[in-house]
Amino acid sequence: MARIAITGGTGFVGRRLAQRLRAGGHDVLVLGRAGSLETGFIDCEAVVHCAGINREIGTQTYQAVHVEYTREVVAAARRAGVTRIVMLSFLRARPGCGSSYHESKWAAEEIVRGSRLEWTVLKAGVIYGRGDHMLDHLSRAFHTLPLFGLVGFRSQPVRPVAVDDVAHVLAAAALGDPRLTTRTFAVLGPDQLLLADAVRQVADVAGRGPWFIRLPVAVHRLIATAAELVMTVPLISRAQVRILAEGIVEPLPAADGLPVDLLPATRFDEASIRAGLPPAGGFGRQDLRCCRVSG
Ligand SMILES: NC(=O)c1ccc[n+]([C@@H]2O[C@H](COP(=O)([O-])OP(=O)(O)OC[C@H]3O[C@@H](n4cnc5c(N)ncnc54)[C@H](OP(=O)(O)O)[C@@H]3O)[C@@H](O)[C@H]2O)c1
């Protein structure tokens, strides 16, 4: 049995990975932003690096969290004698594209690839499941807003991937599957559909019938700017607007395809959507930064 550390282990994907590894009898060290890298990696065989942000607040910038923290994670892993590092990145993280989110995730990938540890980089598209950002926010938006401004993204294709499938690949890499070592893979779900159709499917399963109104991407950016300012977890962030505006089906730069037995297979259908939906309810005061209760 292996001992594995997970940065971002308190987040949506990290939590699911921790459950899977523990169910397999492994010893898991979960690190949130409060966890110490110095002691966290001792006796660990692998580190799975899932920490990340999708909006900047104060000192929590993309440069600090994605780039500098990744450097610290790699350095601490090397000091602790960790054998391998697995990083969860974004499908289209790349340099020189004008988005700090994409560019900083790319810089983090490069740090991991240059770490001199055994490494795997997984570039995932939109990940869904209970506790995610997608189904959770869509469902709560449907319960809060009579109109849903989606149509600026209408033509963009997506391939949503189930969190359990992502956790499966992360676990295989963390446990040293030799087919995954020293390579960068795209991780996408089996179904390709237009974002608007995916959103309508979620609305149907949630039992809501929102109207859809046409909004250009620039208006989505304004909404995202406001949401980042006022919400603890924004309805949509500027990075997410950029992500959705360019479609999420092809890795950039090109990445390897996973071995067949590790390919995500969970269909984006009523059952998987229903399993990932939060309890019915809209956004409330607790979602506003000004009303946040600390502790
Ligand atoms: N969700 C997706 O659809 C998706 C798709 C592709 C790639 N990704 C990438 O996958 C990773 C995990 O995504 P997720 O959806 O699980 O994110 P999440 O739910 O927002 O969780 C983020 C995690 O990162 C930690 N973190 C944030 N800032 C940190 C800091 N300064 N130092 C250390 N840890 C910090 C958080 O810790 P606290 O709990 O302490 O805040 C949390 O554990 C991210 O890097 C994201 O970019 C996500």
Image (cartoon, grey):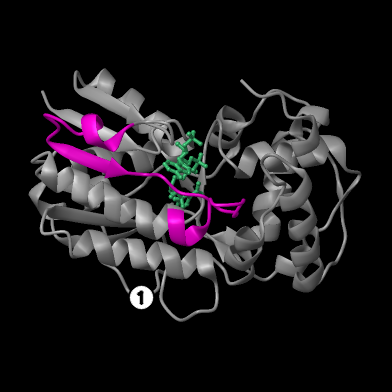
| Image coords of residue 189 (percent x, y) | 43, 52
Residue 176 in view, yes or no: no
Whether residue 93 sits left or right of residue 276 in the image: it is: left
Q: Which residues are magenta?
A: 36-64
Residue 48 part of the magenta segment: yes
Which corner quadrant of the image does residue 4 belong to?
A: top left
Whether residue 195 sits left or right of residue 289 in the image: it is: left
Question: Which is more toward the observer, 282 or 154?
Answer: 282
Q: Secondary structure at mark 1?
A: loop
Residue 60's place in the image compared with 48, above or below, is below
The secondary structure that dominates the magenta segment is loop
Q: How many marks?
A: 1
- Kindly identify the amino acid type of the residue bearing the numbered disc 1: Pro
Query: Which residue is painted at 45% across and 70% down in the image?
Result: 103
Query: Which residue is painted at 85% across and 66% down in the image?
Result: 214
Residue 292 in view, yes or no: yes
The residue at which mark 1 appears reads as 253
| Image coords of residue 169 (percent x, y) | 28, 44
Residue 38 part of the magenta segment: yes
**Any atom of ligand 1 within 8 Å of the CB at mark 1?**
no
**Which quadrant is the N terminus positioned in?**
top left
Crowd around label 1: few <14 · some 14–19 · many ≥20 (10 Å):
few
Residue 246's place in the image compared with 203, above or below, is below
Query: Which residue is painted at 68% across and 56% down in the image?
Result: 197
Question: Which is more toward the observer, 211 or 46?
Answer: 46
| Image coords of residue 70 (percent x, y) | 32, 53
Whether residue 251 sits left or right of residue 218 in the image: it is: left
